[in-house]
Image (spheres, helix red, strand yellow):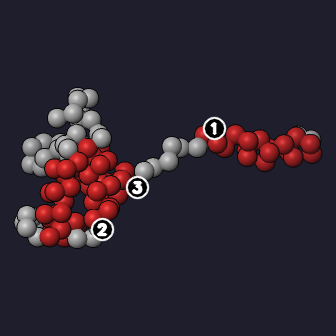
Amino acid sequence: MTLSTLALVPVLALVCTPAFAAEPVSAGERLAATCTACHGTRGNTAGTALPPLAGQSKETLLANLKAFKEGSRPATIMTQLAKGYTDEQLAQIAAWFAAQRGEKGEKP
């Protein structure tokens, strides 16, 4: 390689980087990532032990999350987890799950 060719490598890297950049992750998606261990990827729960979150209404999800946070809906884990979020963050999580599709592509 010549010196001029080597000089072009950093320039090409800078020019091409936006083409390979990932889509930005929304705040709701980032916050909801902590839910995947129990509620599955994108809220599509495997099995029947836990309810799928994908496609439920934002209002229902938010009401349940706030009830967990306040302790009016008892649970073993969710009560503790919900307390770690602000009401605004819970609304972002609820909105993100509400926008997701079920495993078969439909909203439940």
Inspect the image, locate mark 3, and give the three-letter code of the amino acid beneath it.
Ala
Inspect the image, locate mark 1, and give the three-letter code of the amino acid beneath it.
Ala
Horizontally, is 86 left or right of 15 in the view? left
Inspect the image, locate mark 2, and give the three-letter code of the amino acid beneath it.
Thr
Q: Is residue 41 above or below residue 34?
A: above
Q: Earlier in the sequence, mark 2 or mark 1?
A: 1
Question: Which mark's residue is nearer the viewer, 2 or 1?
Answer: 2
How many C-alpha atoms fall within 10 Å of the one at disc 2: few (<14), some, or many (≥20)?
few
Separation (CA) of disc 3 from disc 1 = 23 Å
User: Residue 27: which numbered mark, if any?
Assistant: 3
The percent coordinates of residue 105 (x first, y second) are 26, 29
How many C-alpha atoms fall within 10 Å of the one at disc 3: few (<14), some, or many (≥20)?
few
Question: Which mark's residue is nearer the viewer, 3 or 1?
Answer: 3
User: Residue 82: which numbered mark, if any?
Assistant: none
Residue 65 visible to the viewer: yes
The C terminus - image quarter: top left
Residue where numbered disc 2 is placed? 86
Q: Secondary structure at mark 1?
A: helix
Whether pointer 3 and pointer 1 mark residues with C-beta atoms closer than 8 Å, the reply is: no
Query: Between 89 and 101, which is closer to the camera in this rendering?
Result: 89
Occupied quadrant, residue 102: top left
Q: Earlier in the sequence, mark 3 or mark 1?
A: 1
Residue where numbered disc 1 is placed? 19
Q: Secondary structure at mark 3?
A: helix
Query: Between 3 and 49, which is closer to the camera in this rendering?
Result: 49
Horizontally, is 4 left or right of 82 in the view? right
Q: Is residue 17 above or below residue 62?
A: above
